[in-house]
Amino acid sequence: MANLINEVTIYTDGACSGNPGPGGWGVVLMAGSHQKELSGGEKLTTNNKMELTAVIKGLEALTRPCKVKVYSDSAYVVNAFNQHWIDNWQRNGWRNKAREAVANEDLWKKLLMLTSKHEVEFIKVKGHADNEFNNRCDKLAVAAASEFS
């Protein structure tokens, strides 16, 4: 029987030239000795949308349930899960503390659906520092955004 790889590391980043403006996202997936890069972008978007899209695209690339560590420099994404903002948003009908509609509700719902299929841990990394995989994601995201500039 083959040794199944079910632990995956995903690095993600989003970039935007202007906010809103042309944006991109980048992902580096790692499982065992395998590594894969993904990227894409949009003509008119926001940085937060690109950060969310990067995580979504990374999780969508998984073909079976996995134990996943998602590394992101986005406090917006990491804190939503680790500080349980997303639980409160759902409980409050997708309203934030100020009783305003949660921005990017469609992307959050998609991300929730994807995280329910896996065991996901979100880990905050410092952006634009010395993490080679976060830096690679940044390069992928910036390059993808430049295609829409």
Image: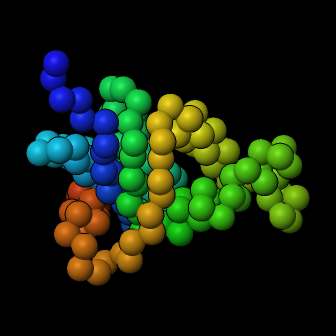
- Residue 68, image x and y in percent? 39, 46
| Residue 19 visible to the viewer | no
Q: Residue at x 53, y 69 (%)?
A: 75
How is colour applied across the structure in the image?
rainbow
Q: Residue at x 48, y 42 (%)?
A: 119
The quarter of the picture where the N terminus appears is top left
Q: Nearer the viewer, residue 74 or 87?
A: 87
| Residue 102 visible to the viewer | yes
Vertical position of residue 94 compared to residue 135: above or below: above
Vertical position of residue 5 compared to residue 25: above or below: above
Q: In the displayed image of the protein, which residue is found farthest to the left?
A: 33
Vertical position of residue 125 compared to residue 50: above or below: below
Q: Nearer the viewer, residue 65 or 59?
A: 65
Q: Nearer the viewer, residue 143 or 112?
A: 112
Q: Is 140 on the left or on the right of 64, as rendered?
A: left
Q: Is 85 on the left or on the right of 29, as rendered?
A: right
- Residue 60, image x and y in percent? 39, 33
Q: Residue at x 32, y 56 (%)?
A: 11
- Residue 108, image x and y in percent? 61, 45
